[in-house]
Image (cartoon, helix red, strand yellow):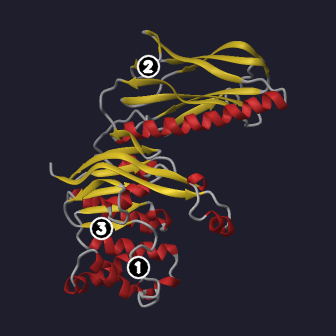
Amino acid sequence: MTTVVQIEGLSKHFVLRKEKSLKERVVNFGRSRKHREDFWALRDIDLQIESGTTLGLIGPNGSGKSTLLKMVGGILQPDSGSVKIRGRLAALLELGAGFHPDLTGRENVYLNASILGLSRVQIDRYFDAIVDFSGIEAFIDTQVKFYSSGMYVRLAFAVAVHVDPDILLVDEVLAVGDEPFQRKCLERIREFQAEGRTIVMVTHGLDQVAEFCDRAVVLEKGRIVTDGTPREALRTLRADFEEVRQEEVERRQLAEEHTLNRAIARFTGISLATSSGVTSSAEIAPGEQLTVLMETFTSGEVTDFKIGVGIATPLGTVLWSTTTELLGDEVPPMRGTGMYQFALRDIPLTAGEYTIQTTLSGLDGREIHHVPAAAQFSVDDTLSSIGPVRLAASFDVRV
């Protein structure tokens, strides 16, 4: 397969100034570096993207996703390393990039398309299709400085997808469009995929990564931490998010323990029991019972709480959940080590892999401890339906 984007040893840093006012900046101008700090947006990035790939760049805010996309698009220059592009590239980066605010929509179509490499004759040929796709015919002769953010995106995307790009870069800009236009854009992306074009997208919509991408890269603090399938990447990212969230919960619990004299409680072990034994990763047959065994520990007495259990896909989509409160069960006060279990009978899931989620929370809704992937299990079933739910079905010919 042909490599269309080759990135080698790519690094980029920005200087963060610590002065809080213009006066401080003037006073400290030309002095020591103690008033400046180097922020490395990217560090030693090596990435190879093949033709026909749809690649998702994901990660927390400030991880370097947009910076990397801008460097691929030629907007930013690296401090070190190189980016090599093969083919025509169209980029949807910052809102309004490539548009002049004092020009009309019509004039900006010609400006933007010419920047992307089209001749005047080619733009004339595509112009009506671009305007029709954008859906802003009534405003095409209005200066774009009067456009809403959604109108900006409509026109920019319409131009980008009509310049016949080999590589399309998309940076979160579709988030500002309305739902019908987003659907239209995603349909066009599917057409590009079917035509074998290369797409690189930055998005916080993880469902879009799972649905559209065949490869995903997780960036963290300017470095690649995962490069693999969307499932692998999303698992890494969600684990990172959960780790940060859990640290915040634990900090809050510690504060409450000292200020409110409230005990800390948490899960210390989760396992699954089947007819084959007890394990943290089970395989069950359709209709087989699965028992979730829970062990907890508290630093003092905990009352007025509930325990929850749920089943989710490996990507984190919850398929089912319940709590002791919903089941009408009251949990006795918890002190020290506790042992609990949920018996899940006749699980109506089709063949596939699933995760068990567990939650401790107060009856007032306050979260105490949540484990999003406490254990894993798989269902071994013959393929008789599509989707996660297994239902009894039959077919007859009506006469």
Percent of width and height locating residue 261: 84, 26
Q: Is residue 81 above or below residue 162?
A: above
Disc 3 + disc 1, Cβ < 8 Å? no
Residue labelled with disc 3: 90
Percent of width and height locating residue 365: 73, 37
Farthest bottom residue in view:
141
SS of the residue under disc 3? strand
The front one of 295 and 226 is 226
Q: Which mark is residue 54?
A: none
Residue in the image at 62% along x and 57% along y:
18
Farthest left residue in view:
1
- Amino acid identity at mark 3: Ala
Disc 1 + disc 2, Cβ < 8 Å? no
Question: Disc 1 or 2, which lies upstream in sequence?
Answer: 1
Q: Categorize mark 3 by other alpha carbons within 10 Å: few (<14), some (14-19), many (20+).
A: many
Question: Disc 3 or 2, which lies upstream in sequence?
Answer: 3
Disc 3 + disc 2, Cβ < 8 Å? no
Question: Disc 3 or 1, which lies upstream in sequence?
Answer: 3
In whole angstroms, how far apart are the C-alphas of marks 1 and 2? 54 Å
> Is any part of residue 61 visible from this angle?
yes
Residue labelled with disc 1: 99
> Is any part of residue 367 visible from this angle?
no
Viewer-nearest of discs 3 and 2: 3
Q: Is residue 300 above or below residue 207?
A: above
Residue labelled with disc 2: 281
Residue in the image at 29% along x and 84% along y:
128
